[in-house]
């Protein structure tokens, strides 16, 4: 009798656990596979959650990159040039999009995949806990290897999830509202980012010297919280992507379905899901090289690709080395850089919504062209910066940068969305990002070699010493001037043709 009761008790516990597991599985399935927006309010709420999640993501990018990452790398024994190359591996990581884009394209629902990629940002928090190993007596070379591998792996996950994320939010925002929405989103994200960076700048200065490890631990804890916030916000968004539907138009869940007549099979015979949320549109799946060849046969894709290459040339020639220049040769403090950055970005926040409306009115390429002038002046300021005038030139450069970035990121993304066909959006955004990532890393690597050579050569003009970063920033100014001319004489003309057809 006692054995019977024990078996009954075990069965009851087992049934209870199965019931609970079923409830949890059903709850997760509804969140990640049945998140179709049912009305306009669902769409608006999803856009707000995206603002929250993207604000956390942009803050993570700054707290786990830029000044804070360079400080971590320098403390681990990396040189200025090596630190610049490490930060540029985020661009190289985009190559993995080439190997994943077709599988991602076949996913009928991408929300779970995007959220899983977001969760990998926890690795960036772990990076700032790794110096504890050095304190415990770990070899410095091993610590450097862990920092490089951890940062690169986190960037790989971030990069392969980016095209699906971009396609997701693009499907939630109509074409005529994108400039306004993305500018408002960026204004919120910038405010959150610069506020937290200002606070962390004070913390890092207070923890300078022997207490630097404490500063890294606080920064890592903040990144940990923001990564979970990013994951939670994206999980609450709706995904306007239909899977298979019944003849009545209802979406089918939890059952095997037949291929629809409009779906084209890939080389393995698997159905290729539609890239569009609109019923009836289907996209063919081909081999990797076939997709790349098809993309480059498209004149508009080639234009978007060349625009991206010019931007990457200018950015990675100069920008990766400016943080170490400020902290090293110019001897500027964290607090000064964070305060100046905060004040400069207040101007960016103020003008971004208005600039976004101008983008909707006059075209992305037109306004993007003018925003690049601000970044050009930022590079010019650092090209003229020396220890004697460092505070003044840093203030000027930061203001120009803030004004330029009020639309630079939005404008480049907007041009890509205008020139890339909607039914091929995820695939071609992946190709664009992956090839651009390889190119950007190559430019950064070559610029790093040039920087090391110039630092050893110590060039001078008429007896005045030139710092290596002054030369790299001068090159950045030149390439930005070329990009601005290309936008004016080629991209703007094509944009008017595309928008005229719409």
Image (cartoon, rainbow, N blue to C red):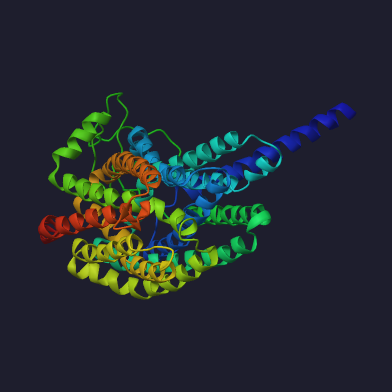
Quarter of the image where the C terminus is located = bottom left
Residue 50's place in the image compared with 126, above or below, is: below
Is residue 428 visible in the rendered structure shown here?
A: yes
Say whether residue 82 is left or right of residue 301: right
Count the marks: 0
Quarter of the image where the N terminus is located = top right
Residue furthest top in the image: 268
Q: Please state the horizontal and vertical placement of residue 315, each as a whole percent of the image.
A: 32, 52
Q: Please report the residue visible at 30 percent of the width from the left and 61 percent of the height from the top.
A: 408
Task: Judge by depth and name the residue closer to the eye, 298 or 275.
Answer: 298
Q: Please report the residue visible at 55 percent of the width from the left and 43 percent of the height from the top.
A: 77
Is residue 265 visible in the rendered structure shown here?
A: no
Q: Please state the horizontal and vertical placement of residue 304, each as a whole percent of the image.
A: 21, 49
Say whether residue 40 is left or right of residue 210: left
Asked where in the image residue 409 lies, by quadrant, the reply is bottom left
Q: Please state the horizontal and vertical placement of residue 471, each as a whole percent of the image.
A: 31, 53
Q: Please report the residue visible at 84 percent of the width from the left and 31 percent of the height from the top.
A: 6
Say whether residue 66 is left or right of residue 302: right
Q: Please state the horizontal and vertical placement of residue 230, each as a whole percent of the image.
A: 51, 55
Residue 148's place in the image compared with 3, above or below, is: below
Asked where in the image residue 389 lies, by quadrant, the reply is bottom left
């Amino acid at each position: 009798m006692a054995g019977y009761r024990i078996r009954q008790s075990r069965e009851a516990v087992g049934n209870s656990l199965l019931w609970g597991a079923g409830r949890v599985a059903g709850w997760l399935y509804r969140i990640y596979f049945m998140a179709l927006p049912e009305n306009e309010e669902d769409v608006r709420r999803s856009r707000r959650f995206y603002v929250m999640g993207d604000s956390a993501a942009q803050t993570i990018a700054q707290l786990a990159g830029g000044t804070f990452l360079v400080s971590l790398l320098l403390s681990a024994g990396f040189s200025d040039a090596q630190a610049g190359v490490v930060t540029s591996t985020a661009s190289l990581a985009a190559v993995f999009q080439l190997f994943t884009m077709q599988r991602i394209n076949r996913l009928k629902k991408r929300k779970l995949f995007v959220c899983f990629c977001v969760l990998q940002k926890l690795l960036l928090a772990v990076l700032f806990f790794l110096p504890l190993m050095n304190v415990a007596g770990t070899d410095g070379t091993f610590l450097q290897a862990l920092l490089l591998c951890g940062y690169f792996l986190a960037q790989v996950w971030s990069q392969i999830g980016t095209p699906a994320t971009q396609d997701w939010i693009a499907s939630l925002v109509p074409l005529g509202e994108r400039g306004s929405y993305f500018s408002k989103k960026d204004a919120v994200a910038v405010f959150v980012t610069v506020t937290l960076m200002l606070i962390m700048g004070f913390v890092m200065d207070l923890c300078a010297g022997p207490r630097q490890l404490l500063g890294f631990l606080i920064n890592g804890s903040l990144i940990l919280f923001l990564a979970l916030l990013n994951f939670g916000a994206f999980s609450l968004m709706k995904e306007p992507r239909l899977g298979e539907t019944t003849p009545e138009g209802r979406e089918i869940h939890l059952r095997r379905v037949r291929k629809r007549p409009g779906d084209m099979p890939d080389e393995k015979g698997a159905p290729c899901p539609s890239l569009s949320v609109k019923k009836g549109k289907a996209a063919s799946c081909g081999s990797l090289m076939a997709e790349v060849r098809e993309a480059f046969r498209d004149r508009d894709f080639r234009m978007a690709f060349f625009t991206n290459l010019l931007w990457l040339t200018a950015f990675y020639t100069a920008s990766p080395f400016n943080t170490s220049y400020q902290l090293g040769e110019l001897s500027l403090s964290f607090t000064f850089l964070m305060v100046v950055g905060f004040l400069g970005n207040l101007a960016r926040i103020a003008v971004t919504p208005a600039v976004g409306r101008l983008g909707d009115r006059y075209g992305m390429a037109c306004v993007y062209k003018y925003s690049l002038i601000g970044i050009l002046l930022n590079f010019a300021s650092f090209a003229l910066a020396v220890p004697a005038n460092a505070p003044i030139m840093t203030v000027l450069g930061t203001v120009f940068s803030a004004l330029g970035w009020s639309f630079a990121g939005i404008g480049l993304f907007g041009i890509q969305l205008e020139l890339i066909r909607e039914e091929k959006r995820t695939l071609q955004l992946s190709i664009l990002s992956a090839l651009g990532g390889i190119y950007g890393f190559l430019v950064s690597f070559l610029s790093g070699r040039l920087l090391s050579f110039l630092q050893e050569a110590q060039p001078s003009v008429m007896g005045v010493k030139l710092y290596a970063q002054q030369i790299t920033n001068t090159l950045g100014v030149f390439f930005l001037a070329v990009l601005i001319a290309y936008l004016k004489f080629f991209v703007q003309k094509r944009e008017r043709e595309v928008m005229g057809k719409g």
